[in-house]
């Protein structure tokens, strides 16, 4: 295991609901290695987004800590982390260029510099020519390209991705998976990628952590051995199909233990 970049230590979180307290995370710990591509896999509603939001500092845990580069960053956003959301979450009144440049703007980067950097990233994610378009004028896949460019704009050490391709059709999803791998291959940021796609997790990640239904607990922690760079051929490896079946079985067993 490489040096630990990010650690979740004994984190618990319950939400107050009209019918009482809903435990979502109970004493969960997780280590993410420096430059590791980690996928978190689990059934809908198990607590993946909650865990990612706690890592990002958007949600405060009831107890436990988030440690980044050896520092306690619990409940604090920023610090070289950027998030890509499932629902894209773009500003509808801003152009593509100004959406991508947003993070630099709030950091006080001057207009010329931030626009230059945003233009470069827009090109990198394949959207050159759409700088002046508004989100509503783009397809879902294009909007998520903007989401990725916006997250990369601040040059984060850690990229947090919450089912970024979940809302896209299969073809678009596979194209964006390859583009993400291409970008990641260049400067290997630490990535925590939430998904409920078994194939997606296997195709992208170095390691897959599998969670049970709520309250989320780790059912398995698997190393993904397929060589990089990965391509369509990776999906056809016999070992790929075997791991997909194995993980499917783990998820099924975990579901049976449901209270
Ligand atoms: N702010 C909140 N207030 C109350 N309950 C919440 C809140 N956020 C999440 N929950 C509940 O916590 C549980 C876990 O939600 P979470 O969004 O973390 O699941 P998830 O694993 O990301 O699911 P999905 O795969 O469907 O996105 C759910 O039962 C949800 O209803
Ligand atoms: Mg979620």
Image (cartoon, helix red, strand yellow):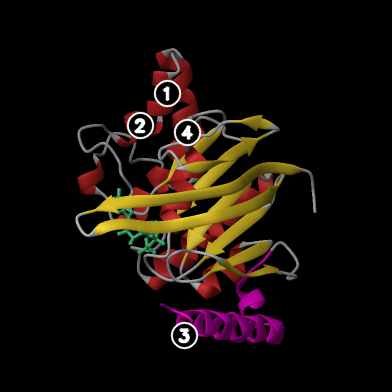
Q: Which residue is mark 1?
A: 115
What is the number of the mark on residue 97? 2
- Relative to 229, does residue 50 appear above or below in the rendering? above
User: Contact, CB < 8 Å: mark 4 with mark 3?
Assistant: no
Of the two numbered discs 2 and 1 on the same chain, state the one appearing first in sequence: 2
Could you tell me which residue is drawn at 35 percent across and 32 percent down? 97
View extreme (front): residue: 20
Q: Is residue 238 left or right of residue 172?
A: right
What residue range appears in magenta?
230-259
Q: Is residue 245 magenta?
A: yes
State yes or no: residue 212 in magenta.
Answer: no
On the image, numbered disc 4 is attached to which residue?
A: 75
3D distance between C-alphas at marks 4 and 3: 34 Å
**Which one is in front, 218 or 16?**
16
Residue 252 placed where, x, y %?
A: 50, 84
Relative to 106, does residue 176 appear above or below in the rendering? below
- Residue 250 in sight from this viewpoint: yes
Task: Look at the magenta stretch and give its main secondary structure.
Answer: helix
Whole-Å distance between the Cαs marked 4 and 1? 30 Å
């Amino acid at each position: 295991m490489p040096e630990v970049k990010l650690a979740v230590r004994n984190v618990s979180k319950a939400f107050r609901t009209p019918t009482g307290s809903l435990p979502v995370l109970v004493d969960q710990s997780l280590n993410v290695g420096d430059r590791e591509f980690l996928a978190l896999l689990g059934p809908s509603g198990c607590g993946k987004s909650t865990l990612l939001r706690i890592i990002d500092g958007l949600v405060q845990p009831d107890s436990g800590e988030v440690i980044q580069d050896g520092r306690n960053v619990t409940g604090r956003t920023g610090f070289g982390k950027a998030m890509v959301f499932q629902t894209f979450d773009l500003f509808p009144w801003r152009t593509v260029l100004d959406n991508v440049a947003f993070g630099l703007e709030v950091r006080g980067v001057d207009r010329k510099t931030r626009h230059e950097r945003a233009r470069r990233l827009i090109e990198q994610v394949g959207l050159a020519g759409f700088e002046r378009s508004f989100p509503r004028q783009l397809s879902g896949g294009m909007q998520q390209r903007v989401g990725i460019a916006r997250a990369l704009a601040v040059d984060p050490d850690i990229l947090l991705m919450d089912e970024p391709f979940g809302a896209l059709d299969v073809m678009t999803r596979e194209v964006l998976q390859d583009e993400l791998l291409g970008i990641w291959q260049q400067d290997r940021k630490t990535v925590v990628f939430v998904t409920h796609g078994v194939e997606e997790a296997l195709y992208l990640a170095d390691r897959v952590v599998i969670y049970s239904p709520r309250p989320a607990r780790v059912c398995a922690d698997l190393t993904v051995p397929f060589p990089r760079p990965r391509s369509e051929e990776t999906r056809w490896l016999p070992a790929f199909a075997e791991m997909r079946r194995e993980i499917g079985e783990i998820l099924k067993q975990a579901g049976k233990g449901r209270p």
